[in-house]
Amino acid sequence: MLKAILADDEDIVRESMEKWIPWKELGIMLAGSASDGEEAYEMIIRERPDIVITDIRMPKIDGLELIRRVHCRLKDTGFIILSGFGEFSYAQKAMRYGVRHYMLKPARKEDLRDNLLELRNEIESRRRERMNVVAESGEKYSFYLQRGMMIEVLSDPSAIDGIIERSMSLTPFDPSEILTAFSSQVLDVQHFISVMIAAVRKRGIRMPIFPASAGGRVFFILDADPEESRGIAEDMRRAGGVYLGAEKGTPSDLISLFIREAGKAGEAAIYDSDGHREAVKVSSPDGGHTELISRYRAAVGGASDPSLMDDAAAVFRSMDLGEAEALFVRMAINGTDYALLFRELGDVKSIDDLISLARSFTDHRIPGERDPFPADTVRKYINENFQNPEISLKWVSENIVYMNPEYLSRLFQRDVGQRFTDYLNTTRVNAARKLMSVYHQSTVAQIAEKVGYSNPGYFFHIFRRYTGMTPGEYMEKVRKNPEEGRENG
């Protein structure tokens, strides 16, 4: 069941909505109501609701500021805005934070119910999509998620509870379940891990947290009963390890054990289900980059900082990739979609990739620096510059909006309803048809070049696909009937 909070300074409005909204019927639990923005913010951070219904005009903190603050902390919280007539400009500003549900006061019961139902369906659909990503990506995605979590907790051990809470819908463990941590001192860590993974699989024991090592000490956190625990201890001895013992606790408790050992050793590693090793940098809580971390988080939250990414890029380039990734996770984790962050981090192979990823999160959110909706920016650029033969999804991603190409592709198709390539080709073909209606004596190659195709053969193929006729056939048709060409163009 989803959780909701009401925020409105008018007692009669709050009390009415508390009573006549069919919360239970909608599958929503009302967790509380607040009479001003400050009270609402504290309640939201404490209760972590899925839905917030808020007025725009409120004491202490207005609805817009409330939405901005919550968006920085709880990216997935959905909002329904209530406002008086003439305040739509406020709602437009809220849209930069993804708010799409706006209602005028006094809201009709039926309309509010419909908005709640629609928002509930959006939230549940988004959750299903995330879980499908996990299911489709399988162990590789889970490994990168846990690796990202480890990078963060090694940088700031005090954040472990919040990290696990944020990731609970994406990881194969429940933060409240009791697991067993087995540890062993070994000489050949790589061989030991491989042998033990095979032994765990043979016994059919669930391994919700990937094995890790620090200073020659190996940790297996398993869902094992007492009988299985005795067998695992014996397996560790046979695999060449000095068995150090087993401890029970929640994932947070057991990961904390490993963090303490990693801090003493100054190094750590995490292994995937095939025993392949990835080193994880152990650093101080902020690594001396407190100011950069604060600036980046502020930018993700909406602050304008034109020199931020130049400064961040310089810092990243002074580090090895592991160090830079650890710093980036610390910078981005509070204001960014958790699943998206670690999914994209899994594709980072170089410092340049990391800089591009870091830039994509800030540029997508900084107001005033660019249009807050990247699809509109891209569409406008294509309309004005389709003659540029360099235009491609990758080129636009790197040179215009500074976003990950796959992420931009998803946003573009969602907002425009058309793939990037189809939009570009349609724009160019329509431009070509207009030129053909005017420049009757031009060759196909000349027309192709004017609309951004350096290869006439490729233009021939694209034109026929989008119009059903070859460029030559279309030009002949226009010569015979210029008026028809102008109408079609």
Image: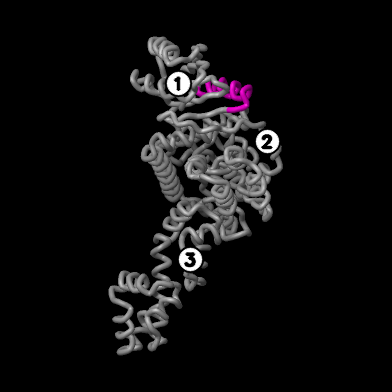
Instruction: Determine the image quadrant of residue 288.
Output: top right
Q: Residue drawn at (45%, 58%), measured in percent from left and top?
A: 412
The vertical placement of 266 against 6, above or below, is above
Residue 160 horizontal/vertical position (percent): 57, 28
The main secondary structure of the magenta stretch is helix
Query: Viewed as shown, does residue 29 lie left or right of 66?
Result: left
Element type at marker 1?
helix
Residue 464 horizontal/vertical position (percent): 31, 73
The vertical placement of 231 against 84, above or below, is above
Comes first in the chain, label 2 or label 3: 2
Q: Nearer the viewer, mark 3 or mark 1?
A: 1
Q: CA distance from mark 2 to mark 1?
A: 32 Å
Q: Which residue is mark 3?
A: 391
Element type at marker 2?
loop
Marking on residue 458: none
Element type at marker 3?
loop
Mark 2: few/some/many CA within 10 Å (<14, 14-19, 20+): some
Q: Nearer the viewer, mark 2 or mark 1?
A: 1
Comes first in the chain, label 3 or label 1: 1
Q: Residue drawn at (48%, 54%), measured in percent from left and top?
A: 405
| Type of the residue with mark 1 | Phe
Region in magenta:
251-267
| Type of the residue with mark 3 | Ile
The vertical placement of 118 against 266, above or below, is below
Query: Viewed as shown, does residue 107 lie left or right of 284?
Result: left
Marking on residue 287: 2
Q: Residue drawn at (66%, 52%), measured in percent from left and top?
A: 310
Residue 409 horizontal/vertical position (percent): 44, 55
Q: Which residue is mark 1?
A: 192
Say which quadrant the N terminus sits in: top left
Q: CA distance from mark 3 to mark 1?
A: 51 Å
| Type of the residue with mark 2 | Gly
